[in-house]
Amino acid sequence: MSSADAADVFHLDGHDVPFTTGETVLAATSRAGRYIPHLCWHPDFAPHGSCRVCTVRVGARLVPACTLPAATGLVVESDTAELRHLRLRLLQLLFVEGNHFCPSCEKSGDCQLQATAYAVDMTGPHFEEFYPARPVDASHPDILLDLNRCILCSLCVRASREVDGKSVFALGGHGIDTHLLIDSPSGRLVDTDFAPTDRAASICPVGVILPKRRGFAVPIGERRFDQQPISAAEEGDP
Amino acid sequence: MNPSASLKLPDGRRRLRLATTSLAGCFGCHMSFLDIDERLLMLIERVDFDRSPFTDFKKIGHCDIGLVEGGLCSVENVQVLREFRAHCRTLVAVGACAINGGLPAQRNHLDLGQILAEVYRERPGLAPGSAVPDDPELPLLLNRVHPIHEVVQVDYFLPGCPPSADAIWSFLNDLMDGRTPHLGHGLIRYD
């Protein structure tokens, strides 16, 4: 590599993607306007690397693009039959693990889980449904928490801790019992200092953290990911 | 439907037989099917309807395509589904309820006996002596509502609540023309 410019490019599915020092493959790809499906990554926060939906192939290795540091000349494969199938199965597992009833969800059409499933042509769940019994926390006067839809991306955990300085949320438990915790003596949202203006109140990529008294302000069919596929949508909060 | 109808289309292709049913669903998917409107006339150029609410046939014959709306909430649902699977070359789960249980499955974290007791015995305003219906004609309920792929092999899923008429039309045309159905953005919808 003789020129500085040539040193700042990696290859994604045959396209050159420029990056800056310290950037990850997913961050650079997103900034370049290209799409690698992802759920737990957000441009404003440090990567978590947990959902694995952004998994790409680099040589013999499968690695999440959100934690993979971009490097000169790196050859990254993302849009391949193998990885499309892997992402489909990951999304199907996420769907059957929770209770995702899109027709009755206020987030439908603005939901990144749903839009990402559309993007990988997921038509059915493939696996058996878990139908877990998860409570709804409607204790807070302004915010509804419907944990049936939680995909454990931890974006609310990171937003509350890093932006709001409150640490209202945490992930607890292990394996299939991993769940979202509320940091209050009662375990209920009303007993925290959570506010609807918090960054964590607007970060949820699915329909867990929802403002009360607002429903169907935008009709089904005219929402963000109804208008255009997630691969073409702006990165960031719904 | 019409025994005298030719088994062949003018271009030499065989006419197809299509069956539809609604299990634990609301018939919304069937209504959406009817929303293909005048395209129904194009459809019946190519297919004959077998068992379906559109024909009111009680028994299913050998079919090329079976469209199943709704999930499984009773033993009768399971029996009808198994008959459809045994008689249809291609079986399609149509709509949210057939695919993941949908709205009826939202009872799955509750105890069935408790639900029946609360609805038929303990609700305010019931007549004295009200009891859970137990007529032997009534199909027994399953403890949990299941999507149909948990009981039989499903060949294709057509999501939506309901799938739009355009999605149903696109899907059926793909199937009738021998293509793997593909909906794409705008037609693939879960809501």
Image (cartoon, grey):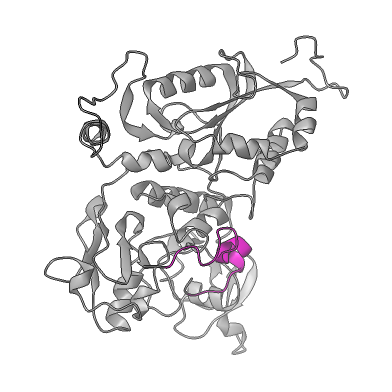
Quarter of the view holding residue B59:
top right
The residue that appears at 25% across and 71% down in the rendered structure is A169
The residue that appears at 40% across and 73% down in the rendered structure is A203
Is residue A232 shown to the viewer in this render?
A: yes
The one of B184 and A187 positioned closer to us in this rendering: A187
Residue extending farthest to the right is B10
Numbered-mark total: 0
Quarter of the view holding residue A230:
bottom right
Quarter of the view holding residue B148:
top left
Residue B20 counted in the magenta span: no
The residue that appears at 52% across and 21% down in the rendered structure is B85
Residue extending farthest to the left is A185
Residue extending farthest to the bottom is A4
Residue extending farthest to the top is B4
Percent across and percent down for residue B52 are 60, 22
Percent across and percent down for residue B29 are 57, 37
The correct choice, above or below, for A66 with respect to A206 in the image is below
Percent across and percent down for residue A114 are 49, 56
Which corner quadrant holds the N terminus of chain A? bottom right
Percent across and percent down for residue A40 are 40, 66
Position of residue B131 in the picture relative to residue A2 (left or right): left
The one of A88 and A132 positioned closer to us in this rendering: A132
The correct choice, above or below, for A130 with respect to A15 in the image is above
The kind of secondary structure the magenta stretch mainly shows is: loop
Is residue A49 shown to the viewer in this render?
A: no
The residue that appears at 52% across and 59% down in the rendered structure is A115
The one of A209 and A87 positioned closer to us in this rendering: A209
Residue A226 counted in the magenta span: yes
Q: Which residues are magenta?
A: A214-236
The correct choice, above or below, for A139 with respect to A100 in the image is below
